[in-house]
Image (cartoon, rainbow, N blue to C red):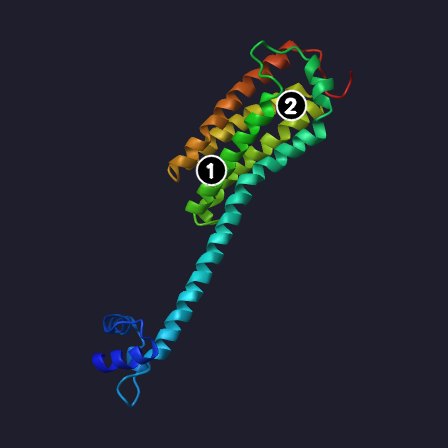
Amino acid sequence: MAEALAGTVGSFCPALTPLDVCTLWARSSEAPALQTEAGLGCPTLFLCEGEKGGKRRQKTTSSYQGRMWAYTVGFTVLPHVGGFLGWFFNRKEIPVWYEKLKKPSWCPSRKVFPLAWTVLYTGMGYASYLIWNDLGGCSSKAVIPLGLYGAQLALNWAWPPFFFGARNLKMALIDILCLDSLAIGTMCSWYRINKVATLLMVPYLGWLAMATCLTIRIWKDNPEQKPGKSE
């Protein structure tokens, strides 16, 4: 039967060798159902179905890859949204009020902050995608790891309005201390899930340590600063 099948398919598809035909036929789970009264079945039908199936699989794979790219970009960009809004709404306060504050000599230049936060937000955003992907999306297992991440991100976004917007140094200090705790908790919950994601959060935690020390120094060195926008 294999020889007859090879000859029949060869008349339709000369490029296929008898070995190729037999291999395709053997792999078909529907081979018995395709046999006809001639005892040869319909190899052309099988081949057409195989070709259609391959195209469907290719299309499905492309669609899946497209969705994963969208998720990757979405998770990576998300932290930047709050960071940009915090800068946008408080940008006028930086040259007017922040520059007049007493700051330690090791305080980074204003020009360093945008670059640093761009790198840090990108790293933490991609790290959150890795965790989300490893946990199979928004499953019950992701509640604590991604919940801690979301909570610390919310406190991160809240710091500029407290510090620059309300000029409330005490609230800004409380905010960043809580943020430190949640950031550490996030990294601890991520460690067993994805170590690469945890490592991507290390620079962020280091920067938070510096920012916390800076906030404490500014709060101590500027006791006259009260909530409200008094010059």
Label 1: how many Cα within 10 Å (few below 14, some 14–19, many 20+): many
Mark 1: which secondary structure? helix
Which residue lies at the image location 68% right of the left edge and 28% below the top edge? 161
Q: Are marks 1 and 2 in contact (CB under 8 Å)?
A: no
Q: Which is nearer the eye, 5 or 167?
A: 5
Which residue lies at the image location 55% right of the left edge and 44% below the top edge? 74
Type of amino acid at the residue the image marks with label 2: Met
Instruction: Identify the disc placed on residue 6.
Output: none
Which residue lies at the image location 59% right of the left edge and 35% below the top edge? 80
Q: Is residue 69 above or below residue 212?
A: below
Q: CA distance from mark 1 to mark 2?
A: 28 Å
The quarter of the rendered structure image containing the N terminus is: bottom left
In the rendering, at what x and y percent does residue 151 appear? 55, 36
Q: Decide if residue 175 is on the left or right side of residue 205.
A: right
In the rendering, at what x and y percent does residue 38 appear? 28, 89
Which residue reaches farthest front?
Answer: 14
The quadrant holding residue 152 is: top right
The quadrant holding residue 26 is: bottom left
Q: Decide if residue 63 is on the left or right side of residue 84.
A: left
Q: Decide if residue 76 is on the left or right side of residue 21.
A: right
Which tag is nearer the camera, tag 1 or tag 2?
1
Q: Is residue 9 above or below residue 60?
A: below
Instruction: Tell me which label, 1 or 2, sits earlier in the chain.
Output: 1
Q: Which is nearer the eye, 89 or 19?
A: 19
Which residue reaches farthest bottom?
Answer: 37
Q: Say which residue label 1 marks.
A: 127
Which residue lies at the image location 58% right of the left edge and 16% below the top edge? 108
Q: Say which residue label 2 marks.
A: 171
